[in-house]
Amino acid sequence: MDTRSVGTALSNDDIASIHKAVEQRLEGGDIIRYHTAPQVGRNQTVGQHTWRGMVLLDTIWPAASTTVWRYFLYHDVGELFTGAVPSPVKWRNKELHNQLNLMEAEALDKMSLPTFEDLDEYEQLLVEMIDVLELVLYCRPVVKMLPKAKEVHEAGIARIWKLSIALELLIKEAVENPIAVSARKSLNIIRSMLSP
């Protein structure tokens, strides 16, 4: 859990631990994605994925909270300790997905970074949809040439639709909530981006 208040730096009490925190956080950006389908990933790193995802976040949901922005910035850094297990594998195996999420959350927590649990239900759904949307958009240019890219792309679209239905139900329950209004706009944008 991220225990710092917004904009508060790590404590100066132990410079060595600050150096270690910086090193770990920066190393997280170097993790290679799509290692089981390198032709799809074209050596995309977590840093590249995160930047693309943050561009989507800024475009689709610019009013996201600081906690969301910080979570998204570091959301895959826990893979330093678990490895980058392909998303479609996790989506097909809920038990594995839950275990990996727990391990990654523990790693983020040890690094004093926000975890998925620090987000409210709207934020969790939108963040995951934007994360998967980056995958879908990344695979889209090579879908016709590479069967594996098509498989990952289609699994991503199915995942987004499943999440979007959950978000839509949540929005219907909170009719006039300002967060629900913002979430509805973001949901519509995300759905519109699923068509080529």
Image (cartoon, rainbow, N blue to C red):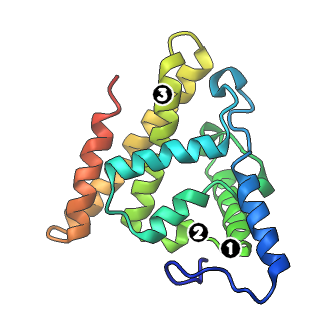
Q: How many residues crowd around disc 1 within 10 Å: few (fewer than 14), some, or many (20 or more)?
A: some
> Amino acid under label 2?
Thr
Q: Which dot marks residue 115? A: 2
Q: Which residue is drawn at the image coordinates 48% and 32% (left, top)?
A: 136
In which quarter of the view is residue 174 placed?
Answer: bottom left
Q: Pinpoint residue 61: horizontal percent, then vertical percent.
A: 33, 55
Q: Which residue is drawn at the image coordinates 65% and 34% (left, top)?
A: 44
Mark 3, mark 2: which one is toward the viewer? 2
Q: How many residues crowd around disc 3 within 10 Å: few (fewer than 14), some, or many (20 or more)?
A: some
Q: Is 60 located above or below residue 151 in the figure?
A: below
Q: Of marks 2 and 1, which one's residue comes earlier in the chain? A: 1
Q: Are marks 2 and 1 in contact (CB under 8 Å)?
A: yes
**Whole-number angstrom distance, CA of label 1 to CA of label 3:** 32 Å
Q: Look at the image and tell me whether residue 104 can be seen.
A: yes
Q: Of marks 1 and 3, which one's residue comes earlier in the chain? A: 1
SS state under label 2: loop
Which residue is tagged 1?
A: 109
> Amino acid under label 3?
Glu
Q: How many residues crowd around disc 2 within 10 Å: few (fewer than 14), some, or many (20 or more)?
A: many
Q: Is residue 139 left or right of residue 57?
A: right
Residues 155 and 146: in front is 146
The residue lying furthest to the bottom in this view is 13
